[in-house]
Amino acid sequence: MAASSSSSTVQFNAGGSFLTTDVTPDQVFTREDLSPAQQMFGRIAHDFMRTQVLPHEKEVYAKDFALTRALLVKAGELDLLRVDIPEAYGGLGLDKVSSAYVSETLGMLPSFPLGTHTTIGTLPIVYFGTEEQKAKYLPLLASGEKVGAYALTEPGAGSDALAIRTKATLSPDGKHYLLNGQKMWITNGGFADIFTIFAKVDGEKFTAFIVEREMGVVSGREEPKLGLDGSSTTALILENVKVPVGNVLGEIGQGHKVAFNILNLGRLKLGTRNLGSAKQALNGALQYAVERQQFGRAIVEFGMIKQKLAEMAVRCYVGDAMVFRTLGDVDAALEAVGHETTAILKAIESFAVECSINKVWTSEALAYVVDEALQVYGGYGYSKEYPAERAFRDARITRIYEGTNEINRIIIPTRLLKNPGLAQLLSGAAAPVNATAAASGAWFTAEQQLLASARRLIVVALRHAKDAYGDKLANEQEVLGHIADIAIEAYALESALLRTRKMVAARGESECASPIDITRVYASDAADRMEHSGKQVLAALADAPEAAAVRDTIRALASHATHNTVTGRRRIAAAIVKAGRYPF
C-alpha cells in the first residue's frame, strides 16, 4: 500500500530559508494536510502498536528478544518496515511524512526497536549501497527476517565520531577486510543480524562496512540503563571480523558521508516520535487529573494543574507545526531532485539546520511534558506501578542520541554561517525579511512583528559574533549556543504561526480558538526566552564595537506586549478537558 506524496501542493522551501524568505501558510505542510492514505497508514501502525505490541509490554521490558523479533516480522507483514525502502527491493518507497507519521506511534512503547531498525539500521544501505548490496540485504530488512543496527560510537569516540580507533586491514589475498576494535551503546546490538560498522582502513581512512553477525561480530552484555529497559544496548567486540571487500558501504575514506547523513535522517524522523511520547504522557496525566479527587473536587479544576496541562498541549502543538513543516519541505525538495542518490543526500543535508532545531526542541519539549506529567500524578507518579515514572526515564535519552543537544546547538549557527543564501544578510548587504507582509487579517500582528525582530537578532548576533571572534568563534560555544536558542525559538514561532494561520483560513477564526490561544501563549513566552539569550550574547560582546547593534535588536524583543497567558492557558486546558485527550 502506498500513501500519496505529501509534497505535491507544497512549494520547495530551501533549508535555512526561514531567515531569508517570507513563507505563506499555503506554502507549508501541516499535520492537517495529511492525506487519507497517510492517515490510514498511520492508523495501521497505531493499531499494530496497540493490539500487538502493548499487550506484550512486560515481555518487551523483560528483554524477550525472541518475542521482539517475532513482532518485527509481524510489522513487516503489515508493511511497516518497508516505508523507506524502494519498491525495487521489496519496499514501498513512501515520502518522509508517511515514514515520520508511522514513527509517531512508536512513542507508545519506545523500547520497541522498529524505529532503530527502519532508520539507522536500514537507511545506510538504502542511500549508500550498491545495486548488489541493496538486492541482497534490503528485502531481508523489509520483511523483518533480518534486523539491522548501526555501530559508530566507541568507548573513546562519541560526539567526536571521527576519532574512532576500530581498524580495517586488507587481507593478504585482497578479498576481505579484517575489522578489529570495539563499539559501544549499540541499539539492537544483542540480536541484530546486519550492522553498519565504521572503521578506519589502515588506521586512517574512515569507512563504512556492511557486516553480518556470522562474520564474527560478538555482542557484549546488555547495558543496565536509566530508561528504555526493553531495548537491546550492547557493546560489539570485533576481533578479526572477516568482511568481504564487496561489503564496503560507499567509498573507502568517505565513511563520514554515511555517518553524518544517516544521523541527519534520524533527526528528521525523531521529532514525531518524541511528540508521540509527549502526547501519550499528556493524555495519561489528563485522565489522572480528571479522576483524582483532592479537597473535594477533581485536581483538574485547580489552576496550577490547568497551567501544566495547557503548557504540555502548547509544546505538542508547536512541535507538530515544526516537524511536519520540515518534513513537507524535505519531501518537496526530494520530489524536485528526482532519484539520483547524490542529489537526494544533498537535498536532505541542506535541511541540517532544521533537523537539528527539531531534534533539540522536541526532545526538550518531551522532557518538559514527562516531568510535568509525573508531577500531576503527585506521589503516584514516582511509583513504578504508574506510567509516568517509566515515561520520565525513557525520555531522558532523547537529548543524547542522534547527536547530543549540545552538538546540535553548535551545528545550528555553524551551518547558518555557511549557508550561501545568508551571505548577503551576514555581510550586511541585505536586511532580513520583516515577516509581516504575508500576514492576513487582524490575527497575530504583534506576533509577526516579534518574528521579524527575532530574525534580525539572529542575523545581527551571527554577524557580529563572527566579526568579534573571527576564526576563534568555534571556541565560543556558549555564545553559539545562545544564538542557536534564538534560532530555535524563531523557527518554532514561525511554524506555529503558519500552522494556525492556515487553519484559520480553512476553518474560520471561531473554529480555531485554541490554536490561536496556543500560538499567542507560545509567542509571549518565546519573546522572554529570546530576550534572555540575546542579553547573554550582548554581555559576551560588551567590549566589542558591535555590541550596540545587538542591543538595538534586543530592545525590539523587549517591546513585545505580554499576552495574558494565565487566561489563555485556562482556555487551552478547558479545551483538552472537554475533548478528553490532546485534540489538535
Image: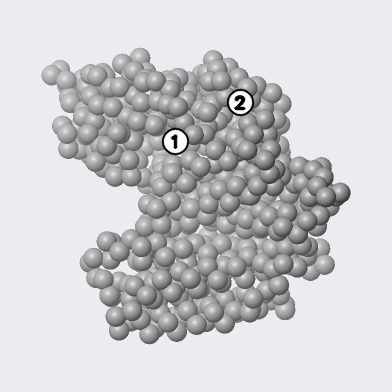
Mark 1 neighbour class, 10 Å CA radius: few under 14, some 14 to 19, many 20 or more: many
Image mark count = 2
Residue drawn 55% across and 30% down?
111
- Residue 475 in sight from this viewpoint: yes
On the image, numbered disc 1 is attached to which residue? 120
> Which residue occupies the extreme right position in the image?
296
Task: Please tell me how crowded label 2 is: few (under 14), some (14-19), or many (20+) other residues with Cα within 10 Å.
Answer: many
Front-most of residues 94 and 476: 476
Instruction: Give residue 374's position: percent from left, percent from top.
Output: 64, 44
Residue 141 is marked as none
Give coordinates of residue 437: x percent, y percent: 60, 79
Examine the rendered structure and indicate whether residue 220 appears above or below residue 345: above
> What is the three-letter code of the residue carrying label 1?
Ile
When asked about the image quadrant of residue 199, the answer is: top left
Where is residue 351, by image quadrant?
bottom left
Residue 69 visible in the picture: no
Residue linked to disc 2: 75
- State left or right for residue 173 relative to residue 568: left
- Identify the secondary structure beneath mark 2: helix
- Classify residue 194 by image quadrant: top left
Residue 239 horizontal side relative to residue 227, left or right: left
Q: Where residue 395 sits in the image (x, y, percent)?
A: 54, 41
Q: Are marks 1 and 2 in contact (CB under 8 Å)?
A: no
Residue at the spot 73% in from the left edge and 49% down from the top edge:
582
Residue that lies at the very extreme toward the front in this rendered image: 295
